[in-house]
Structures are given as structure tokens and as C-alpha cells.
Amino acid sequence: MMADLSKLKKPALLLFAVGGVFHIAFGLVYLTAAEFMPYHSEALSIEWADLDTNYQTLLLALIKICGAGGLVAGIVNLGFVVYFFRRRMSALVWILPVTSLLFQLVMNYAVYMVETTTPGHPPLLLVSIGTIGFIVATCLLFVSYRSENA
């Protein structure tokens, strides 16, 4: 007898929810930042106070844009988790992994670049674990979707 793979939906959605909470936390930290993070200082080999005001303004604007991206990705993520938790999955199921993985993979790439090409030490391990979590969640979600719609 075949296992009921639709039961994988809840663990998949739980992983997406955890990732969504982390995206929101990242977004809020970056949106409320008054200066760059310590690993940004390491990457540039300069302290925030030593930067010209124009550079501070530009960098802070870019940091806040990244924060807004994290916040939006997390909110969309949690919104679809709630939607799919209460309903049978539909063709909209693609939106959840696309929005989650798109933001996560871009973030992973950016953090990897900083880690490998500068003296900075961003949280590469944490971001990579998040990426793996979203990949696992995506696999579970699509196996569950296929089982529900077989």
C-alpha cells in the first residue's frame, strides 16, 4: 500500500513559515538599521563613522531596500502558508516556493560573495541553512501537491 504523501503538506508549510519569520526578522533588522552591520564594516575595512555622509546615505538606502525585500518576501510567504494550511493546494502553490527561494537564493549569493571576496564575515552558514530548508520545504510541498491532486 502506498503512503499518503499529502501528509507532507504540514511539515512543508511549517518549514516555509519558519523561513518566512526569518525573512521578516531580517527585513525588520535592516529596515530599522541606523548604520551598516559589523560584517559590512569588516568587508569595507572601515568604520561607519569614518564614511563620508554621502556614502552613509547611499549605503543605508541600499540596506533599507534589502530590508524591505526581506519583509515583503516574509509577509507573502506567511500569507500563502496560512492560505494553503486551510485550503487544498491549487495552481497557486508555485508562488510560495518561487517568492521564498528567489529572495533566499539572491541573499545566499550576496552573502557568499561578501564572504569569499572581502574581509567580511557575514552569517553564511545561517543563510545557507535557510536555503537548504526552503529547498527541502519545496520538495515536500510539491510531493504533497502531487499526492493531493493525483
Image (cartoon, rainbow, N blue to C red):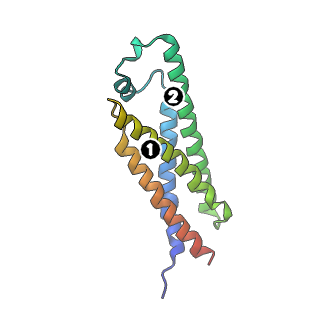
CA distance separating discs 1 and 2: 15 Å
Q: Which is closer to the viewer, label 1 or label 2? A: 1
Q: Position of residue 3 (x, y in %)?
A: 48, 81
Quadrant position of residue 58: top right
Q: Amino acid at mark 2?
A: Ile
Position of 17 with respect to 42 (left or right) is right
Q: Secondary structure at mark 1?
A: helix
| Residue positioned 53% across, 45% down in the render | 103
- Sort mark 1 into few (<14), some (14-19) or many (20+) by Cα contacts within 10 Å: many
| Dot 1 amino acid type | Asn
Residue drawn where x is 62% and y is 51% of the image? 79
Residue at 51%, 78% in the rendered image: 4
Name the residue furthest bottom. Answer: 1
Q: In the rendered view, does 11 fall on the left or right side of 80?
A: left
Instruction: Tell which circle, 1 or 2, labels the residue nearer the N-terminal end.
Output: 2
* Residue identifier under label 2: 63
The mark found on residue 108 in the picture is 1
Q: Is residue 83 left or right of residue 38?
A: right
* Residue 110 image point, x, y percent: 45, 38
SS at mark 2 in the image: helix
